[in-house]
Structures are given as C-alpha cells and as structure tokens.
Amino acid sequence: MRRRRIWTERKGVRRRHLWATLAAVGSLVLASIAVPASRASADTTQRHGLRGDYHVSAPGTYDQFTTLKATVVDPNIDFNDLEPILDSLTGQNDHNTVRWTGQIQPRYSEAYTFSMVGDNGFRLWVDNRLVIDHWVDDWDRPQTGAPITLQAGQKYDIKVEYFENNGGSNLHLSWSSPSQPKEIVPNSALYLPPGFTYPGPLSSTIPADGTSVALTFDKAMQPLPAGQTAHFKVQVNGTEWGLASVTPDPKDASVILLRLADPVPQQAGNTVRAVYDGKGGITTADGTGVPAFNVYVVNNSTYQITTPWAKDVSPTNALPEYPRPQLTRKDWQNLNGTWQYQAGSAGQAPPSGDLSEKILVPYPPESLLSGVQRHDDQMWYRRTFTVPDGWRIGGHCGQPDSCQRLLLHFDAVDYQATVWVNGVQVATHTGGYSGFDVDVTDAVTGSGPQTLLVKAVDPTTSGPSNQPVGKQRSNPSGIWYTPSSGIWQTVWMEPVATAHIDRLDMTPDLTDNTLKLTVQASGVTGEQVEATAWDGDTKVGTVTGPAGAALALPVPNAKLWSPDKPFLYDLKVQLVDGQRPVDRVDSYFGMRSVSVGNVNGQPHMLLNGQFVFNLGTLDQGFWPDGLYTAPTDSALAFDLQQQKALGFNTVRKHIKVEPDRWYYWADKLGLIVWQDMPAMNPDRGTPLTAADKAEFESELHTMIDQHRSHPSITTWIPFNEGWGEYDPARVATEVKGWDPSRLVNADSGQNCCASLPDPHTGDIYDNHNYPDPGRPGITDNRAIVDGEYGGLGLKVPGHMWFGGGFAYEMENSSQQLTDRYVGMDKQLEACIRCGLSGSIYTQPYDVEGEINGLMTYDRRVMKVDAGRIRAANAAVLAAAGTVSNPPPPPPGTPGLTGVGFWP
C-alpha cells in the first residue's frame, strides 16, 4: 500500500466518516478556564507532560500558527496517528500546527542526542537552543540533532513545533546518551511549563485489566448526579469508547470511575483521553463545580486483542505439524517449545550457561505468544535436545553403511543467525524469510542431551544495512507494523542417509503432459532417482534418472489444478543404490500452466490456456498474538478458507514470505497466489549500496527456489510501489530467467509513490487505485491488473489493535461497508470489459493501525454481510467468463460472529 500520495487524493472522502467533532471545541482552550482555588496551589507537576497548543492554518497555508483551537496536556511526543487527535481538538486533520512547551529533566549528567521522525515538518528546541530543524513537507525522514550536555535533576525548557499539511500524520521524539539506549522521551522526564494550570483531575489512569478509567481529584467529590455517562467521553486513539457506567470509587471519595464497555488495549499507549463537558453538575465536597476538561489518561493496561486460537497454544503444542508438506519423511522431531532467551550485544561471546529468560519458540520475541513481548536487536536462544533412540547418528549407528546424518532445520530466523551445537559453531545464515539446514552430525557428542545455542541479530530498520523488512518497522505506525525478530518459524530435526534428497524442483508442463522434476540431493555417489506419481491408489507415471538432472515424469490425461478444481497428485521419490532404497520422501504436485495470451484482442492472464480473472485480496500475514507467526495451523488455514468462502480465487501475499504450510493450504484449497518479495525500507533516507542490492537479489532468488514447486504461486513481484526499487528491467528479467514458468510483475503500483519509470518489462502492468478500482490505460503486450484498491474501513470497538486506526475511506456500519464493496464489484465488471485481468482488494482483515479489513484483526468479527460479498464476487467472475464454485460456508464457529466462518 502507498503511504501518502493516493491517500492524500482521497482524504476529503475519508473525512465525511471521521469521528464527530466535539461540539464546543472552544471550551477546550484550557488555559483560559478558571481553576478551583484549591488547585491554584496544587502541585500541577504531578501530571507530567507537555502543554499542547493546537492550531489551524489560514487558507492556502499549512505551516502557520494562525488560529488556536485547543490547549491540552499531552503525555509526551509519541503519536502513531495524530489524525483523530487533530480532528477532535481542531475540527480538521489537514493544515494543522501544534506547539508543545514545558520542561525536561534528565536522570543522568551526560550528553544527550535527540532524534525525531514524523509526517510532516517539525522543530525542537532544548534549553532555548534549536536542536532539530526539519520544517519540510515530507514524511518519515528521521532527523538527529547534535549532542547537548544536560545535568541530572536540572529542568530545561523544551519546545516542539509541528505542522501537518495533508495525508497521514505521526510524530515521535526520542533521546539517547552514552549510558542509555535510544528511547522515546518518557512522560516521567517531562514537566508542564511553570505557572501553567489546567482543570480536571490530578491524575487519570487505566489499570492492568484495561476495564476502567480512574479520575483522581484533589478533593473528595459530592455524590454524582444521575446520567453522567451523557457528560463523559473516553477516546482511545480517536475512537469514542463505550462507557458502561460513571460512579464514585467506593474506596476513595476523591476518585470517579469510568467503567468501560470494552477493555482498552495496551497498544493504545498514550492515546487515551478522558473528556468531561462540564454540564453534569459534578461538584467537590465544598460545593465547587468541576469545569469541563480534556485530559490524557495513563494507560497501564496489559490487555491486548487475541485470535480465538491463542488459547490453544502451549509449550507442548507450539505448531506441532510437519512443517514441509512437499518433502516429508516419517522420522523427525519438532524442537518448538520453551527455550531459554536473553538479550545480547554486539561482539558478545557465546554465553556458556543458562540464559535469564524463557521464550516460546517459534513465536517472535515481540509477540504476546512468545512470553517476552519486546524487541532486542541482538538475542540469544538456548535449549537442549536428545537424539531419539533408533536414529543411527554418528558413532552410535552400528554398521558404517547404516549410519545416518542429523539435519537441523530452521524454517526462518530474522535476520542473521549463528548456530552452535555443544559449543561448536555449525552455521551462519542471512535472510529473515528463507529457511536453512545444517548437518550437525559431527557436533553431536554421546547419547545424552545436546546443547543448541542460537544468536539472532535483527535491527529491522535501524541497522547499518538496508535489509529486506517488508512492513516491519522499528517505530510502527500507519501502514508499518510491529517487527518480528529472531526465530519465527518451526525449528526441527530429522535423520537422513548419507546420500539424501534436499529439495524437489517441480514444474508442470502441459505441452507434453509431464512434470519436469529435478531432485536436488547431497552425498550422492551414483545413486539413481525413482519418482512415481499417484492419483489416489492409481499409479500415473514413473521416471528414473540421476539426481540433479531434469527428468520428465509422464502425467497422461492430466487432471488440471485450478481454483475451481484444485486437484493435487501424490508423488513418491526415492534414491536407490542398485535395488536398495537409500532415501525416500513423499510429496505432491499440481498440473497447470500460466501464461499471458490474447483474448478478444486484449492480453490477459491465462491459467491452463483460459482467461481466469484473478479476483484477490491483499493478505499481509500478521496476527495480533503471534505477529508474523500464526498461533496454530488451523489459524493459518482459516484466513485462506475465509477468503475462498467469500468468493475470492486469488491472494496477493504482500511483501512477506509465509511458512511452507501456508502455501500447502493455498495449493489444497485452490487459491492463486501472487508472491511479493519483501521490500527494503523505502524511507531509510540513504542510497542503496551495491551490497544492499546483491543481498536483496540473493534473497529474492532464494525465495523463488524454495517455493517454486507450489502450483498455487503463479506470479512473482520483485518490487512494490517503488519501495527500495532499482534496476527494475534487469531485476524482472533475472526473475523471469530464474523461473520462466511463471509471470513476473516488475512493480506492483507502477503509478504510485516512489516507483521508477515503467521498465516495459515483465508480463504484467500493475496500477494501484484507491479507493475505487480502475483499469490502467496502457496498450502493449502485458496483461493489466489493479494490484491494490479498496481500503474501506469500519471501526469495531473491542477488536482494534490500537483502539482506533485509519482507512482510505471510513464507513459507518456493516451495511454501508457491504454496500460500498458491492458497488466496487460493479465497477470491476466494467473494468473487465475494458481488459482488466485481475484485481486485489485491500484487505481481508485489519492489521494493527489499518482498520480496512473485511474481518477484524483478531478474526472474531466479520465486518460485512458475507453472503452479499460472496454473491457480488461471483458476479465479477461470471462477467469475466471465469468458473466460480467456492465451497459453501460451513456453520459458524462458536464464539465467532458473522457469516461464512469455517470451524
């Protein structure tokens, strides 16, 4: 998805549906409101933070402090999304300026380095010195000031100025020092300006369970008049949060409790505000009326939304399924479960003893399911394993000709991994989206527990290299999400013969009804390959030949794979030494062809020689409880099952690479996959180096090699909207050379953002259009697709990651969202008549701050009428002459709402 360009064009549409502006914005100019006499002497610095003056600019300007609209207290400068705050305080979220003032007090006497990043311009003064000056209309360009020496315990004046032109808005202020790592400047270090007073409670807090707001005043309160819920609002990330009741605290007469209809999530951070309109007749014990106030709430909640499958995860069943469906063996052992864990540092020697924490592998440490819930740039993992009895490994194998090798498999570690077994370094690997294997036979000692130690290094977007990161960001906001570091896919081991099969490269060929099969193997000294295809119990065809050679396995009268009938053949492959089998594996494959051909005078994407309109979704592969890692295999399958049940036949896997089992489910269910390469960071602000490009292409090639045998994948997409793009013609040509059997979409979103000029290379031309779909107006021999459109949003309180979020067009109800989607499908029908080959709707489920899914992020609520969506999608496919026969939606799962959920 694009960051600003198209979003900016459509912002006028979005505003129609934003949260209603407070009726009396002028009453929020708090500095002018009388404060009770008892408060005049109160220590107002109890409420840490900064005074925030919110302005709007004059017409034709965007960076002037023209008209003051509101003055409030803000906790610090750490705003993932300022849009709803600007709306509620000023009545608009374009052409705003904000000035924050106060004092800052460090804990240590040393030189501090301040950093800022935001969208759009910003300036920082500390101790009346201009430290950062970036009054520029750009976005997400980190700025760092020269170090400034501060003394512990001393307060210094601080001022931050910010302007928002149009589009998205966020702002973050960090500091670091020789003894302290970089962090957001905390609320505890910030103080209000001397003499500044504000109405309202001395403090306001949310407890760990997230279910209430406690407003603590400096005096006892008189009994509350009835009907107070009409006079209070709680806003969470700009979303009005339901109030169940407003009551006095039975334990403390100076506290008013706002009990909430839904818990406030931890991820809402400092975005929670309590608003009182001043009309509820609330008075203190001495009869003084409480005036209107708008105060931030300290969010101590540890609650976060989770999927229904989170409850099924435990140390004994963390993703227990065999992880490699296209190359299976009987003997294997899963190493997922509880490992030791601790943060590491650069240059640190491998720790020799136990680590200080526990983590549940393979869930990334940033995730809830891991048990750690933080990011470390460098991290250590440790566990022991025991080689099972019966595995003939090393010196315990008996006869030499029966000896086996022990392979250790890491399906994905982000980003750089180093592995030791019993103190012996056995592997290093770079690339967060690819698996790697290591033969650890010679490092195994004795027959008892063996020690496995892993170091992972993942700076995400703050490291020295421009690594592929996809949507991960060190400071997630907007369309950028929480990173997933370290081990995030299954770790496992298996015994193999000295001569053994490593990989099966399979490409169906309908021109001669054969499967082109190359068996990649290790340790081969003359052993031959025997491969047999099966249709159930019926043998279809057999081929023999050497490992590493391209073999043609006959598949006469092939049953073809398609979304309508996703038929899969079984495949059995073995290495034989004479008549003696040495290694055996089971697999599967699908027979289908992919091409671009002329249909009614226009180039179209063809499947099995026929035009199949690719009606898809933008599937980003994030989970609120596991982040990059689905909590269970059932959850992994669920997303694809739901999309199939809604009538889609295509999924664009958006700048993420999934575990093998995700592609297995796509193969089995019959979903066409457009596979993106995870992008390098487009907002890094430093030029790509030759090393960056070489690493990107190496990881791109590896991604293709490791997933080239899945029939569901029909298209490779090396670049998205120009993010980290370079040499697109050369890279697209390389990709086509690596895999001529599939289509290449050189740059999805050629019309958008940072995209380089059209390279006129590849098989597909791809534009992004928001919110309504469109048909790019080009004429050449490439098929034309709308690689992204939609982005229709709907807030569902209690099911949002931040308690709010954005979309490219907000709707007010499920019916309105459904109606709008159905109308877009009607537009797609017209686009198809003009030559469109495929479309990708943003998106199947919410992701963190993006609330533009058909389902909520926790997969608990279907936001739309699934039956109507299914019928509208069927009409689109019918307009293209595409066969559509999605499976009927089974009965709903208990605990889930909506239509079309699968058990």
Image: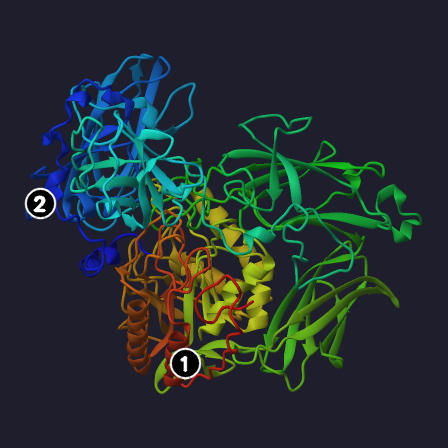
**x and y percent of residue 542 in the render?**
75, 77
- Give the side of residue 100 with respect to residue 345, left or right: left
Write down the residue under mark 1: 874
Q: Classify the position of the N terminus by image quarter.
A: bottom left
Instruction: Say which of marks 1 and 2 sits in front.
Output: 1
Quarter occupied by residue 297: top left
Label 1 Cα crowd, 10 Å radius (few <14 / some 14-19 / many 20+)? many
Does dot 2 land on a helix, a strand or a loop?
Answer: loop
Q: Which mark is residue 61?
A: 2
Quarter occupied by residue 561: bottom right
**x and y percent of residue 817 in the render?**
31, 67
Q: Residue, x 58% and y 61% (percent of image)?
A: 634
- Give the side of residue 344 with respect to residue 159, left or right: right
Mark toward the start of the polypeptide (1 vs 2):
2
Q: Classify the position of the C terminus by image quarter.
A: bottom right
The coloring applied to the image is rainbow
Q: In this view, does 857 lie above or below 528?
A: above
Query: Disc 2 residue type?
Result: Thr
**x and y percent of residue 837 in the render?**
38, 76
Q: Residue, x 28% and y 45% (percent of image)?
A: 235
Say which of 567 and 521 sits in front.
567
Q: In this view, does 624 lie above or below 584?
A: above
- Give the side of residue 170 with respect to residue 429, left or right: left
